[in-house]
Image (cartoon, rainbow, N blue to C red):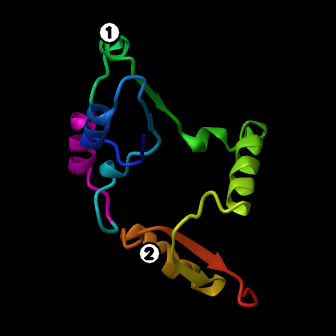
Amino acid sequence: MLDPVGGASWKKAYDMLDKNGRLCCFGMSAAGGSGKTRSLFTAAMALLKSPKFSAMDLMDKNRTVTGCNMGHLFDRLDQLTEQFEALVAMAGRGEISPHVDRTFGFEEAPLAHHYIHDRKAKGKVLLVPEDAS
């Protein structure tokens, strides 16, 4: 299971895992709050609601919890290239199809940023050149 939300969501996701289930935590959007301003209270509450995973519980239930921060891998593209190429190939074969919520022209990049920041996106938001079709 993949969870970009964090906070209490990690506990819910963990509780849904079956034996040999895996949870990959890769974001903490719950700590950001909503709107254009950050709330230290919201961030603190999300952190407090984050579960503390026990090694004994993980072993007893045969579960795995892992985390990934892509920001720490931007200078290690050699570690990402193989997986990126596999995803592109899967998309080319029609095995995966990301949901595109909305597209914006390059000149609308600030609007696209606000659309994402205001949490209106229900899928991918793309910037496209004017001559793209």
Mark 1 vs mark 2, foreground winner is 1
Q: Which residues are magenta?
A: 37-50
Q: Is residue 107 magenta?
A: no
Please state if 85 lies on the left or on the right of 52 as rendered: right
Dot 2 crowding, Cα within 10 Å, few <14, some 14–19, many 20+? few
Name the residue: 66% across, 62% down. 94
Please state if 24 lies on the left or on the right of 39 as rendered: right
Q: Main secondary structure of the magenta part?
A: helix
* Image location of residue 50, percent across then percent down: 27, 34
Q: Is residue 48 magenta?
A: yes
Q: Are marks 1 and 2 in contact (CB under 8 Å)?
A: no
Pick the residue in front: 91 or 123: 91
Please state if 100 lies on the left or on the right of 87 as rendered: left
Instruction: Tell me: residue 14, above or below residue 95.
Output: above
Please state if 119 lies on the left or on the right of 51 as rendered: right
Q: Quadrant of the N terminus?
A: top left
Pick the residue in front: 11 or 52: 11
Dot 1 crowding, Cα within 10 Å, few <14, some 14–19, many 20+? few
In which quadrant of the rendered view does residue 122 lie? bottom left
* Image location of residue 130, percent across then percent down: 71, 90
* Image location of residue 118, percent across then percent down: 36, 71
Name the residue: 31% across, 48% down. 31
The disc, 1 or 2, on the residue closer to the chain's N-terminal end is 1
Looking at the rendered structure, the secondary structure element under dot 1 is helix
**Residue corresponding to mark 1:** 56
* Image location of residue 49, percent across then percent down: 22, 37
Instruction: Tell me: residue 91, above or below residue 49.
Output: below
Q: Which mark is residue 114?
A: 2
Looking at the rendered structure, the secondary structure element under dot 2 is helix
Give the residue type at disc 2: His
Q: How many marks overall?
A: 2
